[in-house]
Image (cartoon, rainbow, N blue to C red):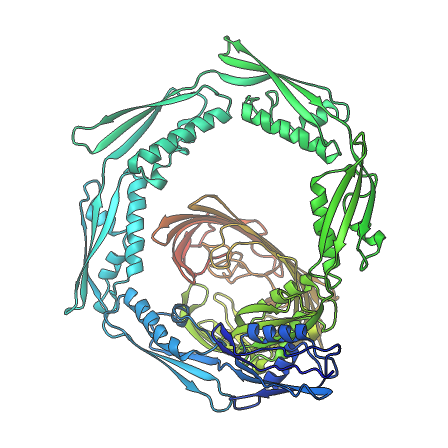
Amino acid sequence: MMVRRRIVLLILACWGSWTVAGYSLADSRAAEPLIGEIVIDIADMPGDTAPLAETARGLIYLKAGDRFSAEKFQHSLEALKQSGIFRAIDIPDPDWDRPEITLTFRLTPFRRIRDIRISGAFPLFEKEVLNAMTFYTGDVLVAEKLADQEKNIARLFINEGYVAPEVSVTAKEDPADGHYVVDVEIGKGDFYRIERVGIRGNRAFSAARLKMRLSTWKSSRLPAGMSRFIQKELDRDTRNLTEFYRKKGYADVVVRPMTEKDRNRKTVSVFFIVEEGPRYKISFEGHKAFWRFTLKKDLVLARRGNKGDMGLRKSIRNIRERYHRAGYLSARVKTEEEMSDDQRVRKIRLIIDEGPQSVVGSVAIEGNEAFDDERIGKQMLTRLPGVIGDGEFVPEVLEEDKGAISALYLKQGYTETRVTDRVRIRDDEAENKKRAAVSLTIGEGVQTRTEAVSFQGLSVLSQADALDGIALKPGEPFRKYMVRSDENTLAAMISEKGYPHVRVTGAVAFSPDKSGATLTYTVDEGPYVEMGEVFVTGNFRTRRQIFLNETELEPGAPFSLIRMLEAQRNIRNISALDTANFKTLGLKEEADRVNLLVEAEEKKPYYFQIGGGYDTAREFFINSAVGDHNLFGLNRDAWICGEYSQIGYRAEAGITEPRFMGTRISSTTSAFAEEKEEFNKDFGIRTMGASQVFSRKFRKYFDASLSFRYEYREQYRTDPDKAIPAGDEDKYDPRSILVTTPSLRYNSTDSFIRPRKGLYALAAVDISKGLGDTLDDFFKYRFEGRYYYTPLERLTLALRGRYGYIDPFSSASNIPDDQLFFLGGTADVRGFDENKLRFDDAGDPLGGRTEILGSLEARFDLGMNFELAAFYDVGSIRNTLLNEGADDFRSSAGLGLRYITPIGPIGFLYGWKLDKEPGESGGKLHFTLGYTF
């Protein structure tokens, strides 16, 4: 009997809404027809459609030469739908009467956003505008959403103080490939200018003092073109004033902002209405066990306020809990209040009746045979008074101790251990304490050991491998909680063999006396699943091979969830991408192949930067850089940069390959030219050369590098009329040098711009070899460590140590001046002129083959982005070529004030020499950009 099967399928996709027009089966037969050919027809898409066809073919589970499978057909439809690549899928009805059928997939792709171009965003960053939009580069373009973007961006600028911004968002099709370029044109128009800022209701603090804390007031003092009203600044000022009042004792304070806008004049007046409430003066009485400073930590009024006295009640509970944890089980806290006649001060006395402290007088343990008293005692926090603790007795802690003892026994297979306690309290009137005699009785029960382990339904792992992976092996103490752990372990092992849908169930059978346990793990491996293809959308510039290099997923290999997650992490680390989202197609449907779809959002590849400024080490300077973050779509970073300052210039061009020859090693190749005349030195340096750096990150904080550098170097006199010292003529000849530098770095600091905690350490050695002479034949060792610690919220301590040593390896040890170490100045020992920590009899700086440097700095946050710094620097230059100056350490101390900007601090530092020599100044003022270390 001939079978007739009819499929008429039309699937329309419109942003997640899919409709199946028709799907019917007329008859059935024993054998499905063969698939002779699968045709992929990409419709309504100009340009090269071969990549889309290749992607579609990879998502279809049916293959030419296979018999038709309704299940695989359904998986194919689901994969095409879930990919989000095609907005319409049309599959014409094949001729089912033929022995071979041809399946045609007519697919209409979504048009995507190739680029988003923004004009008129200043003073906002483009990123802020993009964050306000609901689509992104690489996303599907939906024309109906363009109007929504205009509203979102307009709302953003209204919140930034603009009166009536006009926003136009249009999409223009690129005829080459059918995708779109979205143009965002912003007409900001006028903005509301802050005309005045007033504070009403303030009695405790002057308006002038409060205004100094307000960003809105500071903006109002700026010229008219810069005094823009910003809503989020107003909200931040409201919180700031509230926190300030609370910290000063006004726990009931309420601050309400009010704005009066004049639309005609484009001005806004801002008023902060302050309801101060009374000032709280809280005192403690009767406290002997704790200092007042300690008890104040339990008060939450300064942080949470005191609405409805909730903050006061919470504070009293905190104090009671502190006393209870210290063994004062009957401690009581009562309050006495007094309001001043003018209702402006609320005095609260917290009267503490501590009562006697309960301390542990003795601890007795009985019934224990498996573990001695010492082992059990280590599990307990209820202990006799000693060096570590005061021996306080707290019933809740004793209950926790009993649980810890039971856990100790449970780990050794004692599944029915019972721990009971008996406590006798006696009064010690001489010391006003209660002494607790604690007796613990342990009913150990029977130790249960694993006698046998069997596996049912397991085929992809050997019994030996499965047994080796689990914790409950024969002879091991039985722990019930480890059954679930071993189930998960077995499931993970089997899953990595290509069975991600595996289910493992463990069952336990005990012997009659419960001394033995037999474990049976029943395994349902589920269907075998293999790795499929990796498909990418949104990569208009980045080549698909870059993604494949990062995934390292081999099609046809057993599916591995671990490798899939690792591939996603690697793709997110591609520097050319802004973000990446992932879909695993076929995993949920339990298909026999799982494909990975990457939805990429690329960064804008080209960039241009320019900056300038002033600091003491360079004085006035200007720098610039231009580059491409994604050169040729290969995820390579290429750049050209340069700097010109009052001490010279430097130009550099380079390219970075993040995966050198397919490895995880980063490679940076660069060429440079530099001329530099540092302050106070009587020589300058001209250098040209090239470098090659290989680096590799290890674990979380470590990275290692190996660099090779060729330099064509020339040292010259800054004063042409000054003669070259006799015997040093060869130092002023051009020299060719090859330098090899291995280094190892550790960096756990929490911020590059403003570190507050963590450790930085560097060890490096320059292996320098002169080509044609021996002047530059030496090893240059460099070691540096920095440590940052923040003991208090506003205080950060920074510590630095540095050591350098030059060790010549040729017979000539006359190292040129331009290779020596110099200290003094903004970057190391502050308070000294640049490079003049050590100088010769003529007052010129002396360099040496050894440098030793140490610095300690305290950074105190003053608020309002200001930071006070106090520092101490010490250093020494040794092994000089001239026997002038001294090897002694020289030191300085000083103060500074910095202003913290989003890109780092700027500030003034003044250092005083602590060992000023005759003829030297008493100190030095430094202007700095960034931290010294």
In-image side of 925 versus 476 (left or right)? left
From where the camera sits, is residue 3 visible? yes
Find residue 743 and report its image quarter.
Answer: bottom right
Is 189 in front, or is 824? 189
Image location (x, y in percent) of residue 744: 66, 60
Residue 652 can be seen, yes or no: no
Quadrant, the N terminus: bottom right
Quarter holding residue 351: top left
Closer to the camera, 585 or 325? 585
- Residue 724, x across and y down, in percent: 57, 73
How many discs mark residues in the rendered view? 0
Relative to residue 466, is residue 312 drawn left or right?
left
Residue 18 x, y percent position in the rendering: 50, 74
Residue extending farthest to the top is 430
Q: Give residue 823's position: percent from left, percent from top.
A: 54, 58
Residue 220 vertical position relative to residue 415 in the rendered view, above or below: below
Q: Is residue 170 above or below residue 335?
A: below
Question: Toward which corner of the image does residue 196 lie, by quadrant?
Answer: bottom left
Left or right, 385 with respect to 923, comes to: right
